[in-house]
Amino acid sequence: MISECGNVKVKVRNLSMIFGERPEEALQYLKEGLTKDEIFERTGQIVGVYDASFDVAKGEIFVLMGLSGSGKSTLLRCINRLFEPAAGEVIIDGENALEMTPQRLREVRRTKLGMVFQNFALFPHRTIIENVAYGLEVRGVPEKERLAKAAEVLKLVGLEGHEDSHPSQLSGGMQQRVGLARGLASDPDILLMDEAFSALDPLIRREMQDELLDLQDKVNKTIIFVSHDLDEALHIGDRIALMKDGEIIQTGTGEEILTKPADEYVAKFVAGVNMAKVLTAEGVMKRPEPVIFVDSSPESALKRMRKYRKNFAFVTNKNEEFRGVLREQEAKEAAESGKRVEEVFFLDTPVLSPETPVTELISIVAGGTHPLPVVDDRRILVGMIGQTALLDALTPGVTENGVA
Amino acid sequence: MALPRIPIGDGVEIAVNWVESHFGGLLDLLSTVLGALVEGLKDVLLLLPPLAMALVIAAFVWAVSKRNFKMAASTLLGLLLIENMQLWTLSMETLALVISSTLVALVIGIPVGILCSRSDAANSIITPILDLMQTMPSFVYLIPAVIFFGLGNVPGMIATVVFAMPPTIRLTNLGIRQVPKDLVEVAEAFGSTPKQKLLKVQLPLAMPTIMAGVNQCIMLSLSMVVIAAMIGARGLGYQVLVGIQRVDIGTGFEAGLAIVIIAMVLDRITRSLTEG
Ligand SMILES: Nc1ncnc2c1ncn2[C@@H]1O[C@H](COP(=O)(O)OP(=O)(O)OP(=O)(O)O)[C@@H](O)[C@H]1O
Ligand SMILES: [Mg+2]
């Protein structure tokens, strides 16, 4: 998962952050295997983050997820050094943020690192538009220009007409959007977003998430997004890191986390999610078996079906392109009447694409007599989905690993 | 059992003499500047005839109190009463002393308060000094003031500044430290320089608390300016002193009343500024 390729925008290595006067002591205990609670009892110091490593690629939305107090905000704040890590590295565009001089750090914060705060943290003494323009103001952008830009961003988040209000006059959700606008206004490459949508009601929240994804398509920012909401993480995250007690316990795509939880904790964490909403065919499909070639004989086809204890087989050509489905009954008839496979298999079987959402699969797959083939855009057979695969996927924890 | 007496008093005297002989020139310069400040301010306040000036002050109260007519009217009435008691010139002299003392106290106190808010080391040194300054009887300040600056308005002013400054330092420090941490973090996250952080976030947000400090500073100045009459400061305080010396209750009371009126006017102005 951790790659060294050139488009890594933010690289975090073995990052630890301790709240307390003697971080070395706490780190030593951590190495010895003590838990966060034990360390707090012994030293009175709080482990914020321990040994976190991950890469965020350019243009990626990387979600830090975990329960309250798991260290998400702390980790996020180490990236722009609002908190000084006790150990580790934060590499931004190849430059170690922890070694930056104060001047350089300011420069990077002004131009590269935008931040949206968990509790909005709007300046009460400034109007909405002045809040949004703050980043540009400290950068020295002339007033007219920065107010124009701020007005533009306010429009983007749907707060036109509130430019001259004060934060206290706005609802929580509106304030959150101001915070978002403030983060966007200075047009940073990297956006650090701490529960940026948590105060919005569900409909607007979904809207803002989609808005963010759109924005992402257009301007290709790199986003590190903190969320304690799994649905949100799965919806917007290209990849997700799940945290517990300051440590990252699993990093992967949403599907990886759902279908291959690293341990009991992750499995429990994701158990509540409505799998159908987030899974695609690719995530639940199994290996297509058995497969026969178009020019096989009916006898060999029947042999393969018996071997796999199935009453059907997928038919492909030599290039693995999907051609159709052969059922046991027709194969037998063909064997008796001396016909070739080509003459008896079904050509008009519905096929699924890897991106088909599971919600749509349910109705298609449920009634069928055999699993449906999944083919990619070159019609190559990549998988199959039957009723068992679907059920497995929708009931994590019943099978050990979700999907084979 | 007789412990040798520690010569604290002698020590202070030696220190004072040392300062006198090494910094005499500086003290003279200070004396000249401060004297000019008070005199200049007094001249400005007496530029207009009392009636016109009273109207100007009332109009100013009206403006800063967001057009509170009642406040402006009572201010005008109070000022007219002062004029009626024939205490106008002395009152303006007192006002000049209060304003210039307060200005000096703020010019020193606010930066020191800012320093305290940024450095715990500075704070831990300065806080006990402030405690000392505030518990020391105010009369004690009169002695070194006289020694360094002789008799007159300037030593009165110096004693007033020393007496009135502590709340400004304390409340500036407190105000800045009370600025919500997350707002300071926002300033930092967006790459503010320490100066931008101070001017754009911390000071504006600390302003109500700092203004409360300014208000206290003015009130303390006013009370001290009266006491400073004992070392030759002019104004209403002198009139009170005269009243005491001659056991003339009428003179003393009238001067006292004028002081109360000035206090009320100043209090209204600073409060209005704080709320606005
Ligand atoms: N300023 C601080 N001083 C001391 N301890 C802190 C501080 N900030 C956070 N912590 C501790 O660090 C741990 C991680 O906190 P953090 O705020 O990063 O959690 P989080 O995952 O963001 O939780 P939430 O979802 O509630 O925001 C917690 O145990 C918390 O008590
Ligand atoms: Mg948090």
Image (cartoon, coloured by chain):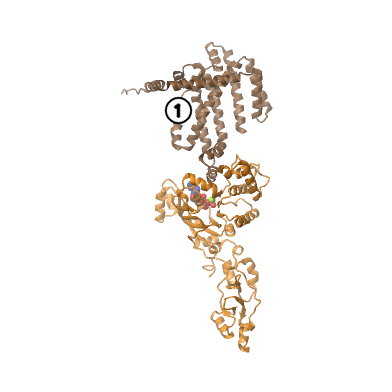
Chain colours: A orange, B brown
Q: Is residue A329 visible?
A: no
- Residue name at image x 41 percent, y 47 percent: A22
Chain bearing tag 1 is B
Q: Position of residue B113 (x, y in %)?
A: 50, 33
Question: Disc 1 marks which amino acid?
Answer: Leu
- Would you say residue B54 is visible in this rendering? yes
Q: Residue at x 52, y 20 (%)?
A: B35
Check the image and name the residue furthest to the top: B246
* Residue sticking out furthest to the bottom: A337
As helix, strand or loop, the secondary structure at mark 1 comes to: helix
Q: Nearer the viewer, residue B257 or A158?
A: A158
How many circles with numbers are drawn on the protein?
1
Q: Nearer the viewer, residue B249 or A114?
A: A114
Q: What percent of the width, then of the height, locates residue A205? A: 63, 54
Q: Residues within 10 Å of mark 1 (few under 14, many from 20)?
A: few
Query: Residue B218 occupies which quadrant of the picture?
Result: top right
- A25 sits to left or right of B179: left
Q: Is residue B166 above or below residue A121?
A: above
Provide the residue designation for mark 1. B132
Give above or below for B243 relative to A246: above
CB of residue at label 1: within 8 Å of ligand 1?
no
Quadrant including the C terminus of chain B: top right
Quarter containing the N terminus of chain B: top left
Q: State the image coordinates of residue B185 (x, y, percent, origin top left).
A: 53, 44
The residue furthest left is: B1
Indicate the position of residue A315 as horizontal and vertical percent values.
60, 78
